[in-house]
Amino acid sequence: MKLTAVYARFFRSLNYDYVRLSNPNYSPDPWDGTPSGAQYPFVRLRLEDQITTVVGGNESGKSQVLAAVRAALTGEGYERSDFCRYSPFFSVDKTLIRPEFGAEFRDISDADIKAIEEATGETGLSRTDRVAIFRMNTTPQLRLYAHRGDQWMEPIHVKKPTLLNETGLPAPFNIDADVPLPDSVPLEFLATGKATTAVGRSVLRSIWDAFTNNSNWFDSKDSVVSQANEISTSFKTSTSIDEKELKKYHLAADLLLKVAGLDRSQFVELQNAVRTKDGYANSIVDTINSELSKALNFPHWWTQDSQFELFVALFEYDLVFMIRDRTGRSYGFDERSDGLKYFLSYFVQYLAHEAPSDGRPEILLMDEPDRFLSSSGQQDLLRVFADFADPEDDARAPVQVLYVTHSPFLIDKNHAERIRVLEKGEHDEGTRIVASVAQNHYEPLRSAFGSFVGETAFIGTCNLMLEGPSDQILLAGISSWLGRQNAPDRERLDLNRITLVPAGGVSQVPYLIYLARGRDIEQPAVIALLDGDKAGNDARATIRKGGARRKPLIADDLVLQLSDAELEGITTDNPHGRVAIEDLIPFNIAIAAASRYCAEFVPDIDISTLGLSAGTVFDEAPTKAGAKGTIDALEQAIRKLTSQASFELNKIGFARSVLTELASDAVQEEDRQLLAANFRQLFTALGVRQRAAVRAESVERVSSRINRARDRFMREHVSTATREHVLLLIEEISGQLDNSEEAEDVRAEMRSWRPRFHLDDDPREAIEDIEELHTALRSLAYLGKRKAANEPVGFTPRADTRQGTSGIASDAGLLETVDTAPGAVSQA
């Protein structure tokens, strides 16, 4: 069985669904009744097959949703005191004394039917297509509803609840978001697993400090007796361990025993070796680190540093967790941020998780994992959730995932269908779950977050500047739709890595690009999409012209215009070609979207009676219809045929209607395929520009960092420098580089300096040819740009005279990219 929905009623702030109850057309479900006969619909949380994200502000009831899921599946974790305080039945009704819960399932197998019949004692359930299990106050308290055809049957008493586990009732489990990896773990705990022996470094240090600072306590038998209270206190307080610290030790043990696959006997052996055989002990530690590295593959998951390495070091009777990053230096856990420690904790719990021995499916419940993580760390955590739900390792069973958050960075914008938003009402209304979040284009999220910063400009790795919000809605919605159609990643937008920024009009695009690029040394990557009309041409010319210094705002080949030749493969019904984004939508879908829009906002116009066709809409003779795009042509045709001169086909409303049509079954397959092909070609072209812009900014960042270090070095070492000075410079530059391809090229070039300048010889000796060193330093900053231009690595560049090129080239009609930098941004 697959869990599809969870229900809760009278549970803390989850009182009842007051919006559904207020609907004049409300039709009660069979479980909505109460002992008094009044109907109170449950608050319902619909779950996706893989991942569901619950979003809400503080005190909106997010944690209560997780508790409700656990209660519905296990019947545990709630008491009478959890009954909603503002329910009309609180302390009034003698029967309704505890909250009520339910869970709904689909994909019922024959084995599930058999287990249900054994649990209930009923027969003849073979045609059941859905099942709902409810925990109620009235008899039968544990009941099951079977759905057949188009209706729910009468409730059945579940007489043997334990047999429900055989139906595939999911087992909930948590990743504990409050327990980080410890700085160190005692060898004794790893060897025995007993809490009584978990004496860590801090304990040993306190004992040692007590000895060294109070050595007079032990001068004689009398002094020991006289100081007995102090000695007892020192030892008593030192050997205690709290529960939170013990949880950290258990997490460390899971990492070393379950994830790395080590055995407790190895730590017993290490304990013994520490006392007498230091070399042997270090060899055991080397083995531990080797197994740990193979098991973790941490750089694959932690994108902030591809050279990140977690290892352990031996300090007397403890293993200390250490970190080595791209600087090549080692750090203790106490020197790094909480975010890294907590991400490691989540990651270890993910790797150490073991599926139930009885083969039951599971659902992961996680409460606000964003509390300690940076925005980048949260994006990495999304990948961990994705692997839980759809494992890369075939040996791991898929796990349904449900997490709650109030961070926009833990929302996968490629999957708007996963989002559920909590909205807290007033007085006795309680918390409800907003429906149709995706169709509302995230609007309820603005209330949940205060302001939805996830759509604020310049947060993403790359920013795509658009003419208006309707473009944003269409591109985001169709990209997500293509993802659900299993389109390749290169043929859709990754909305977690690119921010769609509507400018509020084509004339505002150049200015918004200027604002985005700003005056900082390190500037965000920016690309632009413009319509294929005169206004789009003018905006592109302004971008080329630039600002006060007459330099392009961005490279011209980072701008994509719908009329560009590389999009010639797109099919459109508009005889004027690809004028606006809606021209990529097949005409039949555009007509259906206009009809849906009118039915919702202009009900006195029935599009189906107008006889609209491509011929009637794009009649060029008197009106030049289509010269401003399909929406404008439709609007003009509808005005003409209805004699309503004030009619407006709102672009945002039209865009939303297109997405709604795509989600329905009414669209013809031929039109679906055509729309998919058109937008896949558009997204491919945008993706090429996105990758080029990101690479270009990486080149610029690397150059800026090298130049700052180079200029300081050359000021201080005009005529001479020792080999040691050069080694220190290499170390300084390496420490400032990121993990980009361009940075790796710089590291490789500096490694070539060792034989070239004899840096491994006597470090006190001066460099033989200081001019050659200066030349190498000046060349280093432009290594990425020379590589992009296919110039020799040893080439010393002249002044940069490029006229804004990002290195996007055309090869046999297909776009290719090379690593290079865009034209300089204009400076005010």
Image (cartoon, rainbow, N blue to C red):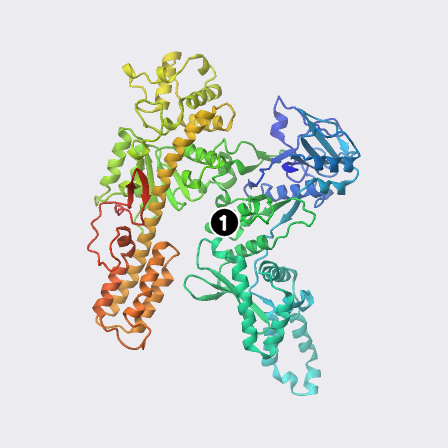
Label tally: 1
Is 655 left or right of 5, judged from the image as shown? left
- The percent position of residue 491, horizontal first and vertical second, equals 41, 38
In the displayed structure, does residue 197 sit left or right of residue 368? right
> Which percent across, then down, holds residue 738?
38, 57
Amino acid beneath label 1:
Gln
Residue sticking out furthest to the front: 812
Residue closer to the observer: 179 or 254: 254
Looking at the image, which residue is at 40% across and 33% down?
Answer: 679
Which residue was labeled with disc 1? 378
Q: Is residue 410 above or below residue 505?
A: below
Q: Position of residue 140 (x, y in %)?
A: 78, 34
* Residue 754, quarter of the rendered image: bottom left
746 up-or-down from 101: above or below:
below
The x and y percentages for residue 551 are: 23, 44
- Within-10-Å neighbours for mark 1: few <14, some 14–19, many 20+: many
- Quarter assignment of residue 3: top right
**Image height of 31 relative to 290, above or below:** above
State whether residue 539 is above or below residue 779.
above
- Label 1 element class: helix
Q: Is residue 396 visible?
A: yes
Question: In which quadrant is the N terminus drawn?
Answer: top right
Q: Residue at x 37, y 19 (%)?
A: 635
| Front residue of this view, candidates 83 and 501 | 501
Is there any visible trace of residue 494 in the rendered image? no
The front one of 280 and 73 is: 280
